[in-house]
Amino acid sequence: MPYLTSTGAAVRTSGAERLGVGVPGYAHPLLAPAEWAELGRPGTPLHWAVLNIDDGPGTRPDPHCLEAAGRLRNARERALHGEAPDDTVRAAGGRLLGHLDLDFGSRPFSELVADARSFLDWYRVGGFYLDRCPADRADLPAVRRLTSTLAALLDDSDSADEEGGRLVLGPGTHPYPGYAEAADQLVTFRGPWTDYRWSQVAEWTAAYEPARFAHFVHGVPRTHLEEAMRVARWQGAGTIFFTDRDGTRGQNDPFAALPSYWDEFVSRIGPGISE
């Protein structure tokens, strides 16, 4: 199969212990209360979840989002300080990330920093998800400037805990290799199962641990869930989100709600595994 072409990837991803869940962005808590509640359920192998109010932080604090952010932050604090000793994934992850839309490099630096400050001031996020990140070599210096600034903002805030903040770049494809050094994690696949099952991993990714990569796949049938996880492991992804929603039948965003097989998905990853 195409995803078995890289022996380096096969060596470094020898087990399921690397996998955890990353949530690209659920709908507003009023529209998706069950989804947000699941993030705090004990044993959920959550690495991070993205908060996106209106393609960013919005114009003012949203009380429902404040409540959801507080619940997730409190769950992480309990895990970090030993009140949930078996929940080591949440101790390693479980961060809330603010959504910053880079619009493939067209948004001004000042706007992005202003949005980041709002996320920190209002929701005390533990990092940022840089959506629609460019992937070309020419755009790398601007992205590195932004991630360096965001890292400094996180260091100066009271949001980052003892494990620091987290920065995730979301090009949705394999970018120029230098992007791997610009943030903590890259989303190197975001798309349908019909493409993912035959996709190939870039050879340069074999030099990095699975914790550096995330894959988001929609339209995954329940009958292919195990195969999808097998692809993720062979391709060296440490963070995943799979759903059977496919963006049709009025679904504007297939990742905005839980998949119908959420419990099975989570149980296949399993609690108590470190990122």
Image (cartoon, rainbow, N blue to C red):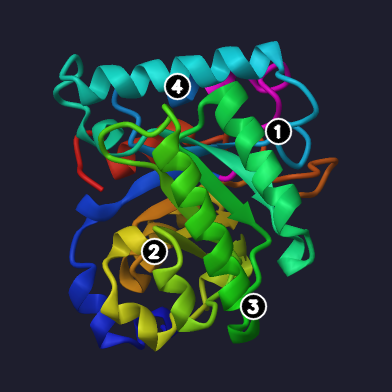
Instruction: Say which of marks 4 and 2 sits in front.
Output: 4
The amino acid type, in three-letter code, at marker 3 is: Asp
Residue at 49%, 15% (x, y): give it.
70
- Which numbered disc, 4 or 3, marks the residue that appears first in the sequence? 4
Q: Quadrant of residue 26?
A: top right
User: Callout 2: few (<14), some (14-19), or many (20+) C-alpha neighbours within 10 Å?
Assistant: many
Find the distance from the CA under tag 4 to the CA under tag 3.
33 Å
Find the distance from the CA under tag 2 to the CA under tag 1.
31 Å
Instruction: Say which of marks 1 and 4 sits in front.
Output: 1
Find the distance from the CA under tag 1 to the CA under tag 4.
17 Å
Residue 174, given in percent of the width and then of the height, sits at: 53, 77
Find the distance from the CA under tag 1 to the CA under tag 3.
24 Å
Residue at label 4?
Answer: 72
- Which numbered disc, 1 or 4, marks the residue that appears first in the sequence? 1
User: Callout 3: few (<14), some (14-19), or many (20+) C-alpha neighbours within 10 Å?
Assistant: some
Residue at 23%, 25% (x, y): give it.
80
The part of the chain drawn in magenta is 24-36
Q: Is residue 132 left or right of residue 260?
A: right
Residue at label 3?
Answer: 139
Where 152 sits versus 197, above or below? above
Find the distance from the CA under tag 3 to the CA under tag 2.
27 Å
- Which numbered disc, 4 or 2, marks the residue that appears first in the sequence? 4
Residue at 20%, 44% (x, y): give it.
274
Where 195 sits versus 98, above or below? below
Where 271 sits versus 199, above or below? above
Question: Is 125 or 200 nearer to us in this picture?
Answer: 125
Q: Quadrant of residue 68?
A: top right
Circle on res. 232? 2
The amino acid type, in three-letter code, at marker 1 is: Pro
Residue at label 1?
Answer: 57
